[in-house]
Amino acid sequence: MIYNTRLIKLREEKNLKQYEVAKILKIYKGLYNQYEKEYEIIPIKHLNTLCNYFNVSFDYIFGFTNISNYANSNNEVDSKKSGKRLKEFRKEQKITQTTLGKELNCSYGTIAGYEIGRYLIATPFLYTICKKYNISADYLLGKIDNPKYLKFKAKDINQQND
């Protein structure tokens, strides 16, 4: 994934130290350090807290867009809305739960759990779906209603973060 570049940039723009960001997330500095280095994957709930704190979108953090935020963005992610949108997206793309599970290297049961809103989609799965299908992470998580799809190419993601 590619979120560490933007996390570091945002933290440094606010002149914050890692321990200060860790305090915002109510975690240990060492864990936040692991998130910034992408040695550990940052959970959606922590990423959402940082998106709200820095007033940026998931799409911006992931490097899918250079537009830092969306008008009318919700502060909270909604597992029920997210599940409904994931299911709608999957059906729109004519992808079965089994096929999507194989693409994400997880079981169809995991996909079913996301779709019924049992829990939020995991960060690496969200990133993979959004990158492959050009769909907005903020849209899938229920933070925005538009845009649903993004206009980017996979090669552009790396260029945006340079």
Image (cartoon, rainbow, N blue to C red):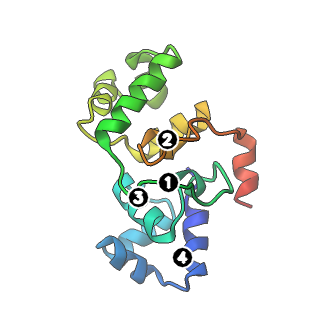
Work out whether mark 4 precedes mark 1 in sequence or the reverse, and give the earlier one.
Answer: 4
Which of 6/30 is in front?
6
Depth-wise, is mark 3 or mark 4 nearer the camera? Answer: 3
Task: Give the CA distance from mark 1 to mark 3.
Answer: 15 Å
Q: Which residue is mark 3?
A: 48
Q: Residue at x 53, y 56 (%)?
A: 57
Dot 1: what SS?
loop
Find residue 107 and report its horizontal and vertical position in percent.
33, 25
Dot 2: what SS?
loop
Dot 4: what SS?
helix
Q: Residues within 10 Å of mark 4 (few under 14, many from 20)?
A: some
Q: Which residue is mark 2?
A: 145
Q: Amino acid at mark 3?
A: Asn
Residue 47 picture quarter: bottom left
Q: Amino acid at mark 2?
A: Asp
Q: Amino acid at mark 4?
A: Arg
Q: Residues within 10 Å of mark 3 (few under 14, many from 20)?
A: many
